[in-house]
Image (cartoon, grey):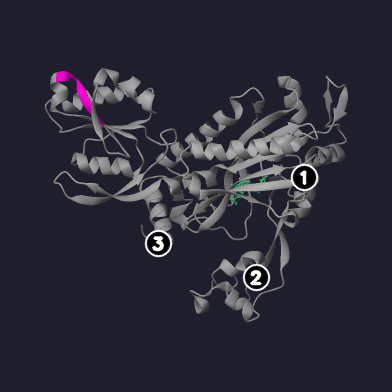
Amino acid sequence: MANNTDVMEKIVSLAKRRGFVFQSSEIYGGLNGCWDYGPLGVELLRNVKEAWWQAMTYREDVEGLDASILMHPTVWEASGHVANFTDPMVDCKECKARFRADQVEDAMCGSAAYKGRKAHKCQSEGKFTEARQFNLMFKTYVGPVEDAGAVVYLRPETAQGIFVNFLNVQTASRQKVPFGIAQIGKAFRNEINTKNFLFRTREFEQMEMQFFVKPGSDVEWFNYWKEQRIAWFHGLGMSKDKLRFHQHEPDKLAHYAKDAYDIEYLFPFGWGEIEGIHNRSDFDLSQHEKYSGKSMKYFEEQGKEKFTPFIIETSAGASRSFMAFLVNAYNEEEAPTADGKTEMRVVMRFHPKLAPTKAAIFPLVNRDGMPELAKKIEADLRPHFRVFYDDSGAVGRRYRRQDEVGTPFCITVDSQTLTDQSVTVRERDSMKQERVAAGQLLSYLRDKL
Ligand code: GAP
C-alpha cells in the first residue's frame, strides 16, 4: 500500500467523495476543527454508537442517561476544569500562529516566509512568546445579559452530567452499587491546534460510562472494564495488532485519577488514543458533595454502611472511534475483472454491524422485467435493512462502488431469476457469489449480518 501520508489523504478524500465526512461550512472556507457527517457517515456513526449502547447498557448493571450540555457553572469548578483544564500556549512572533507549547515539535510554521518549515525552527531562533495557560472550555451566557453572573460552559466532557445525577439514577432505577451509568453526547473543547482529520476537533461526541463501586473493589472493576472495552473494539473487527493499551505514568495522571490506561489505535500518523479508562477514585462525588453541600454518599443496606463510591470510567470518543473504524476498514487490493485481467479495488472492510449500507440490489440489465424484480426485492428488504438500488453502468463497476463504501452484500437479478426466482449474492470481502432464492433473502441476510 502507499505510504502513510498518502493513505490518510486517500481516506480523507474517499470520506468526502462518498459522503462520509464534509468540512463544516465548506462554502465559506470551512471552520477549523469542525466536521459534518454526510449520508453514509451519519449511518456509520450511528452504528458505532448503537453498537456501544447495546454493549454497555443492554446489561442489568448499567443504566442510560442523556444530560444537558449546559450545566450549572459550579459543576466545572467542582470538577477542576475551571482551574486545571488548560493547555500551555505559545505564539510565534514571526508567523502569528498559535501552538500548544508541548506540541510545537510537530507543528508547521504559518507564515509564507517560513512555509514548509517546522515551527520549532522559529523556536530555535527565539521567535516564540513565553508559554501561558489557555482554558479549553467554550464559554457562553445564559439569558440576554452578557455579564459574569450569566457565564456557562459548553461541556468539555459528558462525564459530569453522570456524576451529578448519580443519586437520581440510583434511586429511580433502584440499582445497587456496583452499577454504571452510560451516556453518549456532544462535548466541546477549544483546542489550540486541531489536527489529523477527526482526531482532534473542537466539537465531538463521547461515549462514556461511569461505574460506581465500593472502595476496595475498584482495582478489580478497573481490570474488568479494561478487558471489556478492548474486546469491544476487537469484536467489531479492529485489527488486534493495531490496538494496544498505554498506561499513564504516575506523574502524568489527571488530577482525579488513581490509575489510567488509554486504548490506542495505530493510525497512519502513529498511535493515538481512542478511549481512556480511568480509576477516578472518589474524587468526583466528593468534589460535588463539597461544592453543592448535598450528600453524594451511597447507603448500602446489606452492611448498613454509608460510603462515597469510587468511579471506574470508560470514555471513548465516538468521532475518534468512527475515524479508527474508517481507517481500519480501508484496503487496496488487486481484484479480477470480467475479462480475466486484474484491477485495483478499494474496499472498506467494515464489520457488517457497522457498514452504513447492508446490501445493494442490481438488475443485471435494464430490461426483460429485471428492474421490476430488483425493485420488489429492494422494497421487501428496505423495512429491515438500509439497502441501495443501483442500475447504472456495468455490474463490475457497481460492485466497485459498493466495495468502496463497504456494503457487505450485492444482490443481482439476472436472466436466471426470471426462470427460477433465484438471485446471485456476492460477498464483499471474498467476492464469492452464490445463488439464493429471492424469497429467502431476508433470512439469508439476517443470518449473515
Ligand atoms: N471524561 C474523561 C475524558 O473526557 P479524555 O481522555 O479527555 O477523557 C476521552 O477524553 C475521549 O474523548 C478520548 O479518548 C478521545 O477519544 C475523545 N476526545 C477527547 N478530546 C477530543 C477531541 N478534541 N476531538 C475528538 N475526540 C476527542
- Please indicate whether residue 353 sits to the left or right of residue 430 in the image: right
Q: Give the magenta part as a residue range.
A: 420-425
Residue 360, given in percent of the width and then of the height, sits at: 30, 33
Q: Earlier in the sequence, mark 1 or mark 2?
A: 1
Answer above or below: position of 136 versus 51.
Answer: below
In magenta segment, residue 264: no
The local crowd at label 1, few if under 14, some if 14 to 19, many if 20 or more residues have their Cα within 10 Å, is many
Total marks in image? 3
Q: Name the residue beneath numbered marker 2.
A: 91
Whether residue 382 is visible, yes or no, is no
Answer above or below: position of 204 versus 117.
Answer: above
Whether residue 286 is visible, yes or no, is yes
Amino acid tagged 2: Asp
Amino acid tagged 1: Ser
Q: Name the residue beneath numbered marker 1.
A: 79
Q: Secondary structure at mark 1?
A: loop
- Judge by depth and name the residue closer to the eye, 20 or 267: 267
Q: What is the distance, in whole Å, between disc 3 and disc 1 at their CAs?
A: 43 Å
Q: Earlier in the sequence, mark 2 or mark 3?
A: 3
